[in-house]
Image (cartoon, helix red, strand yellow):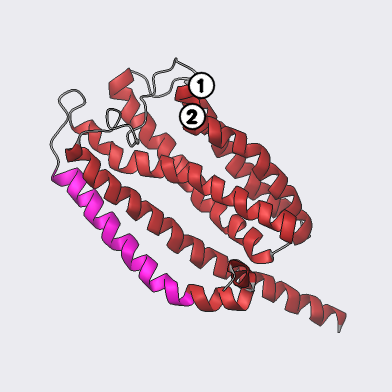
Amino acid sequence: MSIWEYANPVRFMRTSAVLLPWVTGLAVLALGAGLVWGFFFTPDDFRQGSTVKIIYVHVPSATMAINIWAMMLITSLIWVVRRHHVSVLAAKAAAPVGATMTAIALITGAVWGQPMWGTWWEWDPRLTAFLILFLFYLGYMALWAAIENPDTAADLTSILCLVGSVFAVISRYAINFWNQGLHQGASLSLDKEENVADVFWQPLVISLAGFFFLFLALLLVRTRTEIRARRLMALKARERLA
């Protein structure tokens, strides 16, 4: 079976209807377990105190914000190359979720940074790139809303997505590009020396899984809604021509 079969809206609707309850259930279980474990059953950090527990929201939301844009880039490129409507509708559906994740990461980062750095905001390379990424999310959604022709909107937003990917990469790797800035290194890494302690790492991984499944559930719901909206638009167009 080819993956391109799911570019068929009928096949996508049928498959997503089966997956959605399972994905939603996994999101609820993982989020509940990760956040309850992290906030109520882990100790305070010897340096950061209880503020370290913001990590269970900040790190997953920041990780998802970057990866959602990467997903939008891939589906937008599929649209440009193969003109599959489901792929670009998935990108459109993901954008508000990604923007929300980015906003959560910026807000929790400010709350976490204030007691640690003594300031709510610092023009750190990673923070600045992340703020610009948030603006690209807003611009992407605004461009969809501003253009009436859906195929033209899909083409232009795909180009915008390609440009915005530069800032997604910078947001992820700024700490490697520049040896300056207040932002710490990666909390989760293949390098064990960079990881947080196991007592924080384990619930963090579960929270990250919860955020991933939450995004997947919202993506399925919103993509299904976009497909229905596209069908309704096509029916109205036929009625006007009849």
Q: Position of residue 210 (x, y in %)?
A: 33, 55
Q: Which mark is residue 173?
A: 2
- Secondary structure of the residue carrying numbered label 1: helix
The image quadrant of residue 239 is bottom right
Does the stretch in magenta take in 135?
Answer: no
Report whether 217 appears left or right of 129: left
Q: Nearer the viewer, residue 178 or 220?
A: 178
Q: Which mark is residue 177?
A: 1
Q: Which residues are magenta?
A: 17-41
Residue at (43, 63) in percent of width and height: 217
Q: Nearer the viewer, residue 242 or 81?
A: 81
Q: Is residue 241 above or below residue 27?
A: below
Q: Identify the image quadrant of the C terminus.
A: bottom right
Q: Nearer the viewer, residue 80 or 218?
A: 80
Q: Position of residue 157 (x, y in %)?
A: 70, 49
Inter-mark Cα distance, 2 to 1? 6 Å
Q: Is residue 205 above or below residue 105?
A: below
- Residue farthest toward the bottom in the current orientation of the protein: 242
Residue type beneath disc 2: Tyr
Q: Identify the image quadrant of the N terminus.
A: bottom right
- Residue farthest toward the right in the current orientation of the protein: 241
Residue at (58, 33) in percent of width and height: 167
Q: Is residue 87 above or below residue 41?
A: below
Report whether 111 appears left or right of 147: left
Give neighbour class at mark 2: few <14, some 14-19, many 20+ (Cα, 10 Å).
Answer: some
Q: Which mark is residue 220?
A: none
